[in-house]
Amino acid sequence: MSKTVTIYSTPVCHFCHKAKEFFKENNIAYTEHDVASDADKRTEMIDMTGQMGVPVIQVDEDVIIGYDEDKLKELLEIK
């Protein structure tokens, strides 16, 4: 079952890099939005979460604020 994964991140965010490494290691396709340079996506992220911290990771309808590898594994059904 394919999941839609989106990450809202910034170029200097350590945990954003960790999340993207996790996706690559597990062959998870994802869409990335750089909220440092894309004001519309930044507004979208703030409207979704009520805050400006990154990463914000959306897996289908679920939203994770921050890098939570255990929650990602659960949502992406990775053992």
Image (cartoon, rainbow, N blue to C red):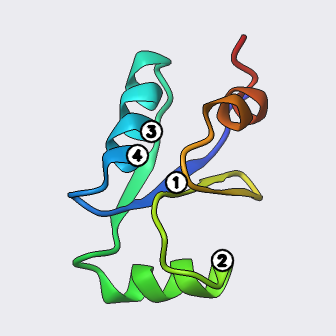
Q: Is mark 2 on a helix, strand or loop?
A: helix
Q: Mark 2 points at which residue?
A: 49
User: What is the three-letter code of the residue carrying label 1?
Assistant: Thr
Image vertical order of residue 58 relative to residue 3, above or below: below
User: What is the three-letter code of the residue carrying label 2?
Assistant: Thr
| Side of 15 relative to 10 (left or right) | right
Q: Toward which corner of the image does residue 58 lie, by quadrant?
A: bottom right
Between residues 5 and 72, which one lies in front from this camera angle? 72
Q: Name the residue under label 3.
A: 19
Disc 4 from disc 3: Cα separation: 6 Å
Q: Residues within 10 Å of mark 2 (few under 14, many from 20)?
A: some
Check residue 6 in the rendering and tell me which mark sits there, or answer none.
1
- Pointer 4 with pointer 2, Cβ within 8 A: no
Between residues 3 and 67, which one lies in front from this camera angle? 67
| Side of 10 relative to 71 (left or right) | left
Q: Name the residue under label 4.
A: 15
| Side of 6 relative to 2 (left or right) | left
Q: Where is residue 31 in the image (x, y as percent from the top left)?
A: 43, 51
Disc 3 from disc 2: Cα separation: 18 Å
Badge nearest the viewer, 1 or 3 = 3
- Pointer 4 with pointer 3, Cβ within 8 A: yes
Image vertical order of residue 25 relative to residue 1, above or below: above
Sequence-earlier tag: 3 or 2? 3
Q: Is mark 1 on a helix, strand or loop?
A: strand
Residue at (72%, 10%) from the top-left corner?
79
Disc 4 from disc 2: Cα separation: 17 Å
